[in-house]
């Protein structure tokens, strides 16, 4: 089911330009429309947690998996911008429901296995991003319509959900905690860093194909390769992340990763060709890969707030980056240009790199190995 989430995200990325062109949306209008998916997710997450507590994880995960498969083709059928916004709301609600409850499920599975499994689950999400973007781009290169590509992704998600169903744990989840805990102390710094990293990742999902199509004049098949490159390096980086943290420490991992991502974002925005822009996004993926995991480890080690409240606060701040970031990029792009908006994202990543040293002691306490 982690794979299903990644497949939906990766499959949507190269389809964004087609929705934009078909409905003749400006950058600002596209950004506002994309915001509907984030609103759907944030509305559905608390409800999904409550339903999992009452009926068990399996029911909610399977229902949301079926829903996202049914909704996905509608993203290519919506005749007007409001209809696309409604479809994106349902898409985000289904995705947010799985995203919330599958992590509850993963904790239960880890507990039963009595060994770490969470990184492997999240790596499957990243791997599926590559498969989704590559499959859609490949089908379009071979002459398939965007609707046919979306239908193929939907069929794969539906099949995966039905195959996974018997193996899902049916036990009930604990009651969800508060939706938001006001951060304080060093948790504010960690939360702000998460906001920037999630913003950067969201910009790769929603705007990489648009950048290649509109600013680098890539054809439809080439446009999805930027997100595929981003996903590939992020996936590979996560498999080797624990070794990096063991050698460099958590704060240095954050600083080096943010610096690498900033360089990649600037390269993607300024490169003269679609191929070099795609290489820039590969660098963004390599840089972002281990920053957020390191930040969540630091959240668990800080002493300014209780662990559960701190993790909730950082999660909300991080998700705010996914929710507001792509829309903000659209508005900035409408006032200036899309490359200029992405340069602003690179500047924020540089700020994270510059502030990473504060994670060692003054902000959150001594937490490096």
Image (cartoon, rainbow, N blue to C red):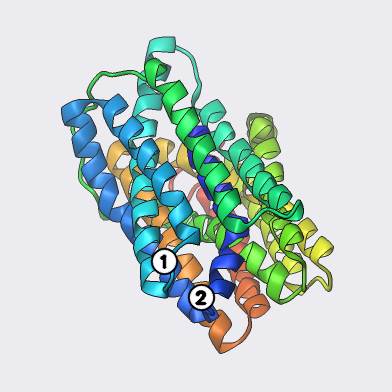
Where is 128 relative to 280, above or below? above
| Residue sitting at x 65%, y 49% | 136
Quick check: can you spot residue 136? yes
> Is residue 108 left or right of 172 when viewed as pictured?
right
Viewer-proximal residue among 307 and 273: 273
Disc marking residue 23: 2
How far across and down, in percent of the image, does residue 351 sit? Answer: 58, 65
| Residue sitting at x 72%, y 76% | 215
- The outermost residue toward the top is 113
How far across and down, in percent of the image, does residue 13 sit? Answer: 59, 56
Q: Badge 1 local density, few (<14 within 10 Å), some, or many (20+)?
A: many
Contact check, label 2 and label 1, Cβ < 8 Å: yes
Where is 104 relative to 48, above or below? above
| Residue sitting at x 39%, y 37% | 65
Quick check: can you spot residue 351? no
How far across and down, in percent of the image, does residue 306 sit? Answer: 28, 39
Viewer-proximal residue among 349 and 50: 50
| Residue sitting at x 55%, y 54% | 12
Disc marking residue 71: none
How far across and down, in percent of the image, does residue 239 sit? Answer: 66, 31
Q: Badge 2 local density, few (<14 within 10 Å), some, or many (20+)?
A: some
Image-quadrant location for residue 236: top right
Of pointers 2 and 1, the one earlier in the residue sequence: 2
> Is residue 305 left or right of 78 when viewed as pictured?
left
Q: CA distance from mark 2 to mark 1?
A: 9 Å
Tag count in the figure?
2
> Which of the image's four quarters has the C terminus?
top right
Image-quadrant location for residue 337: bottom right
Mark 1 lies on residue: 84
Mark 1 falls on what kind of element?
helix
Viewer-proximal residue among 305 and 209: 209
- The outermost residue toward the left is 54
């Amino acid at each position: 089911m982690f794979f299903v989430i990644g497949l939906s995200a990766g499959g949507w990325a190269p389809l964004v330009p087609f929705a934009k062109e078909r409905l003749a949306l400006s950058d600002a209008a596209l950004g506002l429309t994309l915001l509907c998916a984030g609103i759907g997710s944030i509305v559905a997450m608390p409800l999904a947690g409550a339903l999992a507590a009452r009926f068990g994880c399996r029911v909610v995960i399977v229902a949301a998996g079926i829903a996202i498969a049914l909704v996905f083709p509608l993203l290519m059928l919506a005749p007007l911008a409001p209809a696309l916004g409604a479809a994106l709301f349902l898409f985000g609600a289904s995705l947010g429901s799985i995203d919330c409850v599958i992590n509850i499920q993963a904790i239960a599975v880890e507990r039963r296995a009595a060994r770490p499994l969470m990184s492997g689950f999240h790596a499957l999400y990243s791997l599926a991003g590559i498969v989704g973007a590559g499959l859609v781009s490949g089908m379009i290169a071979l002459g398939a319509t965007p609707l046919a590509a979306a239908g193929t992704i939907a069929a794969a998600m539906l099949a995966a959900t039905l195959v996974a169903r018997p193996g899902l744990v049916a036990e009930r989840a604990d009651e969800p905690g508060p939706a938001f805990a006001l951060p304080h102390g060093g948790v504010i710094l960690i939360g702000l860093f998460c906001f920037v990293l999630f913003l950067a990742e969201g910009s790769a999902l929603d705007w990489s194909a648009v950048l290649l199509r509109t600013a680098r004049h890539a054809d439809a098949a080439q446009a999805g390769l930027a997100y595929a490159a981003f996903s590939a390096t992020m996936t590979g980086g996560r498999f080797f992340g624990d070794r990096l943290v063991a050698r460099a420490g958590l704060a240095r991992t954050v600083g080096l990763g943010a610096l690498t991502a900033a360089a990649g974002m600037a390269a993607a925005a300024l490169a003269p060709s679609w191929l070099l822009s795609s290489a820039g996004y590969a660098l963004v993926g390599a840089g972002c890969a281990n920053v957020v995991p390191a930040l969540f480890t630091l959240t668990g080690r800080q002493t300014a707030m209780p662990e559960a409240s701190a993790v909730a606060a950082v999660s909300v701040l991080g998700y705010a980056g996914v929710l507001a970031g792509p829309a903000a990029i659209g508005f900035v792009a409408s006032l200036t240009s899309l490359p200029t908006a992405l340069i602003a994202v690179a500047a924020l990543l540089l700020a994270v790199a510059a502030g990473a040293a504060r994670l060692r002691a003054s902000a959150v306490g001594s937490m490096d190995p």
